[in-house]
Image (cartoon, helix red, strand yellow):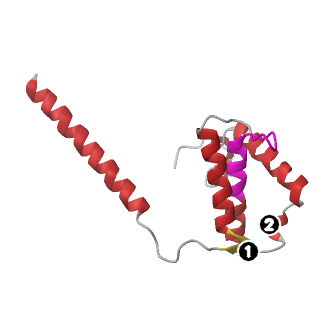
């Protein structure tokens, strides 16, 4: 743990908790706009009233993320930043998971995506090491 910046005993306890200072305020603003859009369309905290399916929010998050990556910043339907919608989908999934209202309809067998990503990153790093070693040897 880092050294407390002052002599206040509350500081030590506060430093053990998640720091909201690590979250960019602009992200919270876009998340809030997306959540307000959802409130206006479906009702405040509507996902807590009934179970929600993971696949629905995953699909929506991915559509918004891909739309943003494809060059469209704002959702033309809502006028909200696509990344705000991505965060809203993730927030709802996390909330549903915590409260037990999430219908976890992901594939019942875990996939290999995380493992493959780690392996590909290792291969890339190994390849870069080999390339830099060859370049040093040639110099």
What crowding class fits label 1: few (fewer than 14 Cα within 10 Å), some (14-19), or many (20 or more)? some
Q: Nearer the viewer, residue 107 or 10?
A: 107
Q: Which residue is mark 1?
A: 101
Above or below, comparing residue 65 to residue 45 in the picture: above
Q: Quadrant of residue 54?
A: bottom right
Location of the C terminus by quadrant is top left
Marks 2 and 1, how far apart at CA: 8 Å
Q: Are the residues at dot 2 and dot 1 in contact (C-beta closer than 8 Å)?
A: yes
Q: Nearer the viewer, residue 8 or 120?
A: 120
Q: Earlier in the sequence, mark 2 or mark 1?
A: 2
Q: Nearer the viewer, residue 97 or 38?
A: 38
Residue 121: x %, y % from top left = 34, 48
Using the rendered image of the protein, determine whether residue 58 is visible from the camera's viewpoint.
yes
Q: Nearer the viewer, residue 85 or 133?
A: 85
Q: Which residue is mark 2?
A: 47
Q: Residue furthest top?
A: 139
Q: Secondary structure at mark 1?
A: loop
The question of residue 88 being in magenta is answered with yes
Q: Residue at x 63, y 60 (%)?
A: 58
Q: Residue at x 80, y 66 (%)?
A: 47
Residue 40: x %, y % from top left = 90, 53
Q: Residue at x 68, y 50 (%)?
A: 87
What crowding class fits label 2: few (fewer than 14 Cα within 10 Å), some (14-19), or many (20 or more)? some
Above or below, comparing residue 36 to residue 47 in the picture: above
Residue 102: x %, y % from top left = 69, 72
Boundaries of the magenta span:
75-91
Left or right: residue 78 compared with residue 63: right
Q: Secondary structure at mark 2?
A: helix
Residue 127: x %, y % from top left = 23, 42
């Amino acid at each position: 743990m880092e050294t407390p910046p002052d002599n206040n005993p509350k500081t030590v306890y506060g430093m053990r908790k998640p720091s909201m200072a690590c979250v960019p305020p602009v992200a919270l603003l876009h998340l809030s706009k997306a959540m307000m859009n959802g409130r206006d369309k479906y009702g405040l905290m509507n996902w807590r009233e009934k179970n929600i399916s993971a696949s629905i929010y995953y699909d929506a998050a991915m559509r918004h993320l891909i739309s943003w990556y494809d060059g469209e910043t704002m959702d033309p339907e809502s006028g909200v930043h696509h990344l705000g919608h991505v965060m809203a989908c993730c927030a709802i999934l996390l909330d549903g998971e915590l409260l037990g209202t999430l219908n976890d309809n992901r594939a019942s067998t875990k996939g290999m995506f995380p493992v493959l990503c780690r392996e590909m990153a290792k291969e890339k790093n190994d390849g870069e090491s080999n390339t830099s070693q060859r370049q040093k040897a040639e110099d």
